[in-house]
Amino acid sequence: MLNMLILEILRKYTDEDHSLTQQEIIRLLDINYGMDCDRRSVKNNVLSLKELGYDISMEKGYRLLSREFDESELRILIDSVLFSKSITTKQAKSLIEKIRSLASNYFNAKVSHVSNLPELSRTLNKQAMYSLDALNDAIAEKKKVSFIYNQIGTDFKLHPKREEPYIVNPYQIVANNGKFYLISNYDKYDNVAHFRIDKMTEVRVLDEKVKPMSKVSEIEKGLNLPKHMAEHFYMFSGESVAAKIKTTEDMMSELVDWFGTDFRIIEKNEDSICIRVNCNQEALRFWGLQYGPYVEILEPKSLRERIAEDVNNMQEKYS
C-alpha cells in the first residue's frame, strides 16, 4: 500500500509550485495513515510510481506535476455542478467534494468559497439522477420507457399530471438552461416530444424496442442536435417555421446566443436588419415577448398576430 499512500499524499500536498521533502512525506504518512517509513522506502516507491507513468519530479523535493484534470478543467466541472438545476443540493455538494478530491489542497483553498454560495433553485425530485441513469440505459439498449410525468403544486411538491404512465421512444438526452431534457416520440404521433427529466418519476425501461427515427417526421434523416437545439431553445415540442425578424445590428450577439449561426441576414440598412431563421413557433412567441422592445416578428403572420394579442392582454393587466 505504501506507493499508493505516497501517491495520495503527492496528490493532496503538491503541485507544480509546491513540493515535499522525503522527511515531510514520512511525517504525513505517520499523521494521516499511521504508516512508518524510512527515506530509502520513500525514494524507491516514488521511482516505482514514475515507472508506472506518474509525472513526478524529484528535483528540489517531490512534486506531482500532471493529473487527470488540470485546475481549469476542475473549475469548469465544479461550476457545471453548481449551476445545474437537475440535481438536488445534497447531490451537488457530494459531487463537488468528489471533484475537489482530484486536486491538491492548494487548488481547494482557491475554491473553498463555493461552499458558501447561496442556495440555487434546484430540483425537488430526488429521483432525478436515477431517472437519468435509467434513460441512458434505455437509449443505449434502444428500448421504450415508461414514467410518471409531474408538475409542481402550491405545496412545492411534485404531483402527477395524470395517473396513467407516459410511454415514449427515447432518442437523446440534452442539457438546456441548467436542466436535462429527454428528446423522444409518442408512438401514435410522428413528431418529437420533449420532457424535463427532473419532472419524471418511476422511470422504467421496457422490453419493447423503440420506433426508428426514420419513422418520426421531424428527425427522419437523423437527429441533428445543434440544429434541433437552436430551433427549440425553450424545449417546446412542435414543428419549426420559417420566421422573419426585424431588429438592430447591436442585437447580433443575442441572436447568435439563441439561434447559433443558422440564420441569414436578408436585409440591412443604417437603422435595422432583418433575418430569416427556422424556429419552433411557440418558442419564438415567448422569445419575441422576452425581447419585445428590441425585435419585431414580421412572419409568419399567424405568430405576429398571436404576439400582438399577447401584448394587448399585457397592456390591459398593467394599465
Image (cartoon, rainbow, N blue to C red):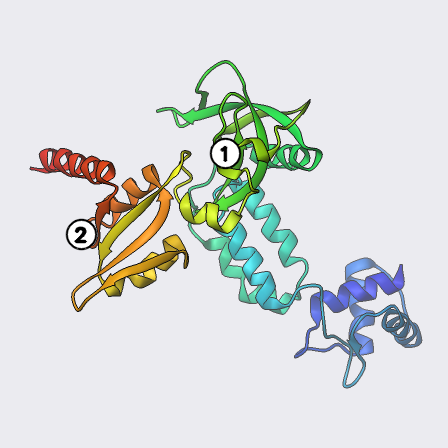
Quarter of the image where the N terminus is located? bottom right
Q: Identify the residue shown where x is 57% and y is 67%.
A: 72
Instruction: State whether residue 157 appears in this view.
Output: no
Using the rendered view, name the quadrant where residue 37 is placed.
bottom right
Q: Identify the residue shown where x is 61% and y is 46%.
A: 94
Count of marks overlaid on the render: 2
Whole-percent x and y of residue 168? 56, 26
Q: Identify the residue shown where x is 81% and y is 58%.
A: 33
* Vertical arrangement, residue 156 with respect to residue 49, above or below: above
Using the rendered view, name the quadrant where residue 77 is placed.
bottom right
159 left or right of 128? left
> According to the image, label 1 marks what residue?
217
Disc on the earlier residue, 2 or 1: 1
- Which amino acid does the dot numbered 1 rest on? Ser
Extreme residue in the left direction = 319
* Vertical arrangement, residue 1 with respect to residue 64, above or below: above
